[in-house]
Image: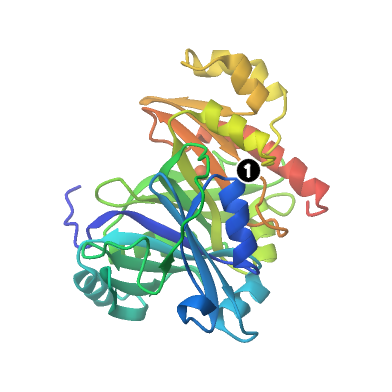
Amino acid sequence: MSKQDFLPIKGWDHVEFYVGNARQAAHFYHKVFGFKPVARMGLETGCRDRASYALQQGNVRLVFTSSYTPDSEVARHCALHGDGVKVIALEVSDCEAAISAAHARQAQVIQRCEAFEDADGVIKTGILRYAGDTVIKLVERTNYRGPFAPGYQKLHVEHVQGVGMAAIDHIVTNVYLGEMDYWARWFERVMGFSQLTHFTEKDISTEYSALMSKVMENGSGKIKLPINEPAEGKRKSQIDEYLEAYNGPGVQHIAMNTADICKTVSELRARDVDFLRVPDAYYDDLKDRVGHIDEDFEEIKRLGILVDRDDDGYLLQIFSQPVQDRPTVFFEVIERHGSRGFGVGNFKALFVALEAEQARRGNL
Ligand code: FE2
């Protein structure tokens, strides 16, 4: 299918979380996940209503923001959703044109293209409404040389040992039953994305719960945004559990690429990151299922890493436990060897594991 890329995207720009305590969140992502704090804004920089920290590792930028006041947009978001992702930011080369194109295609524009300036240059941003309270921010930073964005002050933090996160691979959103198609079509219409894959409940179901997923991808293939919705099952699906805990649709997980998943996961485990427990039985016939891989099967099993193979190659992946009290947002670490998939062969094994955790929380 030939399509005109009317909204060309250069890549992921950043992901912003609204959290209860940005200072502590930044410390956690610094010391545990290996992100280097690069810039900050708050009272010291003249910002009276919120504090933000921007952290970076490889090409992954995360921002953590909390409110100084009880009735701000940030505070309300936290009260309703707990800590969670507010902004998925994508880099564009022409913000004005991108927002105009999205507007012409019936996107709900929350903020028209605006320029923000400081001594390091100009950034232009515009904001589109996405699922629930989540927004998509388009960022033009070609003429900006600062550490993150105008208003932020550069941080001089001692070098932190990264864990090898190189880039964002994909970001998954959970929506209510019946909304997946709306957002899949929205990405086609507004952003010029196309549908890469469609998983039905036949692919992704266990005895108890099922989900459906459509993976949307931009023209260059750099941006992948899967959208999940719950499917009917015997019990409450993990997507329903999320929607209930988050009080609505929102980002379920952020997957980050590494070039050496064994090293990354060893390091994260040494720093006490909790991962989803994979049943031992998963590894019993793994060799038969995936064939030859460059990594050592024993090490893969010891670290609890999942493997999947498709026609293009294989991938290695692992999922963290939720990173806040509510069973909502979590992270995935992924290493791709040719495969452009999402580990559909792992879904079954993974969901059995997820449901075991859900049952432990009394939510199944
Ligand atoms: Fe994923």
- Label 1: how many residues lie within 10 Å, few (<14), some (14-19) or many (20+)? some
Where does residue 90 sit, x and y in percent of width and height?
A: 34, 60
**Amino acid on which the number 1 mark rests in the picture:** Ser
Where does residue 46 sit, x and y in percent of width and height?
A: 47, 82
Name which quarter of the figure residue 299 lies in. top right
Point 80% across, 52% down: residue: 361
Q: Is residue 290 above or below residue 68?
A: above
Element at label 1: loop
Q: Which one is in front, 343 or 84?
A: 84
Q: Which residue is mark 1?
A: 320
Q: Is residue 96 above or below residue 237?
A: below
Point 30% across, 60% down: residue: 91
**Residue 232 appears in the figure:** no
Where does residue 122 sit, x and y in percent of width and height?
A: 25, 72
Q: Is residue 174 left or right of residue 58?
A: right
**Residue 269 appears in the figure:** yes
